[in-house]
Image: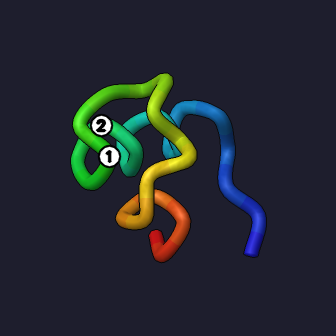
Amino acid sequence: MYLTQEVKKDIFKEFGGNEVNTGSAESQIA
């Protein structure tokens, strides 16, 4: 599934705590 950078940032902010922490388990699941 393709997500734009903006959408990804929103998801990572919601589930990962911040935009840079894309390696967290929550972000990986999302």
Q: Residue furthest right?
A: 2
Instruction: Name the element at disc 2.
Output: helix
Distance between the alpha carbons at the discs numbered 1 and 2:
6 Å
Q: Which amino acid does label 2 sit on?
A: Lys
Where residue 17 sits in the image (x, y, percent)?
A: 23, 37
Dot 2: within a 10 Å radius of its alpha carbon, few (fewer than 14), some, or many (20 or more) residues? some
Q: Is residue 22 left or right of residue 26?
A: right
Q: Are marks 1 and 2 in contact (CB under 8 Å)?
A: yes
For the residue pair 14 and 23, the one nearer the viewer reads as 23
Question: Is 25 drawn above or below residue 16 in the view shown?
Answer: below
Please name the residue shown 42% across and 26% down the image.
Answer: 19
Dot 1: within a 10 Å radius of its alpha carbon, few (fewer than 14), some, or many (20 or more) residues? many
Where residue 7 sits in the image (x, y, percent)?
A: 50, 44
Residue labelled with disc 1: 16
Q: What residue type is labelled 1?
A: Gly
- As drawn, the label of residue 28 is none
Residue labelled with disc 2: 13
For the residue pair 23 and 13, the one nearer the viewer reads as 23
Q: In which quarter of the image is residue 10?
A: top left
Where residue 13 sits in the image (x, y, percent)?
A: 30, 37
